[in-house]
Image (spheres, rainbow, N blue to C red):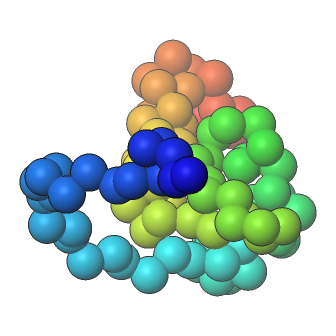
Amino acid sequence: MKSDCAKMPTDIKHKPLKPLKPLLSLEEVASKLRVHRTTVSRYAYSGELRCVPIGRRLMFDEDDVVHFINARKQLFENWVSQGCVMGKE
């Protein structure tokens, strides 16, 4: 006797999927940012840089990397405007 749970509905309408952009590896992000891969891992695990865990690897959307860079720029601009940057007299 077959269960009704195994039947997939046939009347569901799906939106067409957008083509996926290739994700960046941890090494690629580290190279682009010119930092060590451990630094990128630390940003990812702290939540500062969004990542997509796939298996045991961390992968990154390029848009998230750009957002991270822009957020760091804004943070630095705020520090400068408040006089928090050393060497500015």
Tally the marks.
Answer: 0
Task: Pick whichever, 89 or 10, lies toward us.
Answer: 10
Please give the name of the residue rendered at 61% of the width and 48% of the height, measured from the top-left corner: 49
Q: Is residue 4 above or below residue 39?
A: above
Q: Is residue 23 above or below residue 46?
A: below
Front-most of residues 35 and 11: 11
State left or right for residue 43 relative to residue 3.
right
Residue 51: x %, y % from top left:
61, 54
Identity of the residue furthest to the front in this view: 1
Judge whether 45 appears above or below 13 on screen: above
Quarter of the rendering containing residue 30: bottom right
The vertical placement of 10 against 33, above or below, is above
Report the side of 29 relative to 18 (left or right). right
The C terminus is located in which quarter? Answer: top right
**Image coords of residue 10 (percent x, y):** 19, 57
What residue sits 14% from the left and 66% below the top?
16
Please give the name of the residue rendered at 76% of the width and 37% of the height, measured from the top-left corner: 46
Residue extending furthest toward the right: 38
Left or right side of 6 for 53: right
- How far across and how far down the image is residue 6, in percent? 48, 52
The residue closer to the viewer here, 48 or 56, is 56
Going by the image, does 33 lie left or right of 27?
Answer: left
Residue displayed at 67% across by 37% down: 47
Residue 52 visible, this orientation: yes
Q: Is residue 73 visible?
A: no
The x, y position of residue 24, in whole percent, is 56, 77
